């Protein structure tokens, strides 16, 4: 039995148990989404894999994104797109705690797509607040299709529209040579292009283009132009291009022409040729186009848009990364296997022991704690604090959270504590999914509280509820990490 219900720009197509939703973007391009249910039983209309930019392939590799041209035939957007090219994490192969962050769709350069979750049925008159999610991953990994990023629960429980997008990572998104053929920051411009798409089109989904809130996780660092030029030369040499690090006057135009012809797989094989300890090789750069100056200088000078800010960090930010890098401090073969790691913290304590002053080497528990706090503060907490403080000092309203709850469903060893990124499960309402998980009642309440904070912030720039059911501790001094 097949039936259609028309309503100007959209109609519903019933096929058995499924319900397809067809409507047109603001430019007239037809889309076919679907109506589904969240794991809490609520109705959600979802559009998965909407193209927002032209495929960055061939001559468009490394270049800034180009808006997607309109199309005439209905486009099926009921499945996630492919993920942007990257190297999946295989260090703890077979371990769900690590592999949950690996791409769960095929990898491809043609990856610039976004997803939209709308609570209930489509209604362009609703003007719902819009939350835009940008995944983390140090600019070298990540995808919007991860199970943990499924937006159905958050959208339906909080009555908000949720949007997520893919953007280019690693060398494909951040190769920089100072030319328009490889200007750097392409991955950041992908994000901007996706947000522009949201502003142009979200009204047809029932969203309010004046109520768009962005959320991002796991930022990393920036590099100087000179550092990224050197890295471009290194990967050029590794890919057998004629322009190398030894050239006194390298021809960067020739370098880019060569790298555009190199198979994507070979670029991935050599993306870490520029590797440094506790660092990622391909990051944003001050390009004087998108980033006019170093963000830290902009913060100190107050050279940024005044807006509300919600920022935070977790209690044990660096442990997750340290376990990947300790073999750079010690010879792993001497005493370390991944199986032992899952049941023992001996390696972690030995790493801390080697980095601590002699007078602090008497308490084994302190070794682990000190190393985590030292690196966690340096790479995450201090930057979050500085960011929040600068916003506050220049007159913006700032809300700061410090996440200290270790999930009962956490698969990493207990001694690792509250890891980087694992508040996301609570933000997306995973504890409410009783079909696949067995969270405690208190964790369900924590998740509802976390979702409400975020949704309130998106609705009115204030995390609190008007009825006083959610409160905060008012203080201009964010947590310092100790």
Image: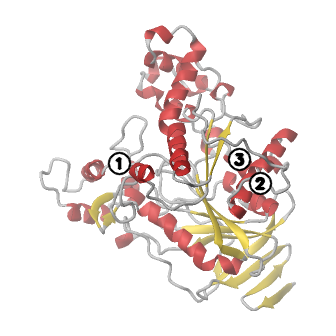
Q: Secondary structure at mark 2?
A: helix
* Picture quadrant where residue 438 is located: top right
Residue 45 x, y percent position in the rendering:
76, 71
Q: Are marks 3 and 1 in contact (CB under 8 Å)?
A: no
Q: Marks 3/1: CA distance?
A: 31 Å
Q: Between tags 3 and 1, which lies in front? A: 1
Q: Please name the residue that numbered disc 3 is placed on.
A: 425
Q: Nearer the viewer, residue 406 or 258?
A: 406
Query: In the rendered image of this protein, does residue 67 appear above or below residue 373?
Result: below
Instruction: Give neighbour class at mark 2: few <14, some 14-19, many 20+ (Cα, 10 Å).
Output: many
Residue positioned 36% across, 40% down in the render: 275
Q: Between tags 2 and 3, which lies in front? A: 2
Q: Between tags 1 and 2, which lies in front? A: 2
Location of the C terminus by quadrant is top right
- In screen coordinates, is 295 left or right of 458? left
Q: Nearer the viewer, residue 136 or 262?
A: 136
Residue 312 x, y percent position in the rendering:
61, 44
Answer with mark 1 or mark 2, whichever residue precedes in sequence: 1
Q: Are marks 2 and 3 in contact (CB under 8 Å)?
A: no
Instruction: Say which mark, if any, is on residue 452.
Output: 2
Res. 333 in view:
yes
Instruction: Say which mark, if any, is on residue 380.
Output: none
Q: Please name the residue that numbered disc 1 is placed on.
A: 223
Answer with mark 3 or mark 1, whichever residue precedes in sequence: 1
């Amino acid at each position: 039995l097949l039936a259609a219900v028309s309503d100007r720009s959209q109609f519903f197509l019933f096929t058995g148990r499924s319900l397809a939703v067809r409507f047109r973007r603001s430019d007239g391009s037809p889309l076919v989404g679907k109506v589904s249910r969240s794991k809490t039983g609520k109705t959600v209309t979802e559009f998965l894999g909407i193209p927002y930019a032209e495929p960055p392939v061939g001559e468009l590799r490394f270049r800034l994104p180009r808006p997607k041209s309109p199309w005439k035939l209905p486009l099926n957007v009921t499945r996630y797109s492919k993920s942007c090219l990257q190297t999946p994490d295989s260090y703890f192969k077979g371990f769900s705690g690590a592999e949950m962050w690996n791409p769960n769709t095929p990898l491809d350069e043609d990856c610039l797509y976004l997803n939209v979750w709308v609570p209930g049925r489509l209604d362009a008159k609703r003007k719902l607040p819009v939350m835009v999610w940008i995944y983390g991953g140090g600019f070298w990994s990540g995808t919007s299709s991860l199970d943990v990023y499924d937006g159905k629960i958050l959208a339906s429980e909080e009555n908000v529209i949720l949007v997520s997008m893919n953007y280019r990572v690693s060398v494909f998104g951040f190769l920089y040579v100072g030319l328009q053929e490889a200007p750097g920051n392409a991955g950041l411009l992908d994000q901007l292009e996706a947000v522009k798409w949201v502003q142009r089109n979200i009204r047809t989904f029932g969203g309010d283009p004046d109520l768009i809130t962005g959320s991002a996780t796991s930022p990393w660092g920036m590099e100087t132009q000179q550092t990224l030029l050197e890295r471009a030369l290194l990967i050029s040499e590794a890919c057998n291009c004629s322009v190398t690090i030894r050239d006194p006057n390298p021809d960067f135009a020739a370098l880019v022409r060569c790298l555009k012809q190199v198979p994507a797989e070979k670029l991935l094989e050599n993306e870490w040729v520029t590797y440094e300890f506790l660092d990622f090789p391909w990051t944003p750069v001050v390009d004087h186009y998108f980033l006019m100056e170093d963000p830290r200088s902009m913060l100190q000078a107050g050279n940024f848009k005044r807006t509300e800010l919600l920022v935070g960090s977790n209690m044990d930010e660096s442990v997750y990364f340290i376990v990947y890098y300790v073999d750079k401090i010690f010879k792993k073969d001497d005493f370390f296997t991944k199986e032992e790691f899952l049941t023992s913290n001996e390696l972690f304590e030995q790493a801390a022991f080697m980095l601590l002053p002699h007078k602090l080497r008497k308490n084994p528990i302190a070794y682990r704690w000190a190393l985590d706090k030292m690196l966690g503060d340096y790479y995450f907490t201090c930057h979050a604090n500085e960011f929040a403080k600068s916003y506050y000092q220049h007159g913006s309203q700032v809300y700061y959270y410090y996440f200290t709850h270790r999930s009962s469903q956490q698969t990493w060893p207990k001694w690792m504590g509250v890891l980087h990124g694992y508040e996301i499960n609570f933000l997306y309402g995973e504890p409410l999914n009783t079909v696949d998980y067995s969270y405690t009642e208190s964790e369900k309440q924590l998740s509802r509280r976390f979702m409400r904070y975020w949704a309130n912030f998106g609705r009115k720039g204030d995390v609190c509820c008007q009825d006083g059911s959610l409160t905060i501790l008012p203080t201009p001094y964010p947590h310092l990490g100790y």
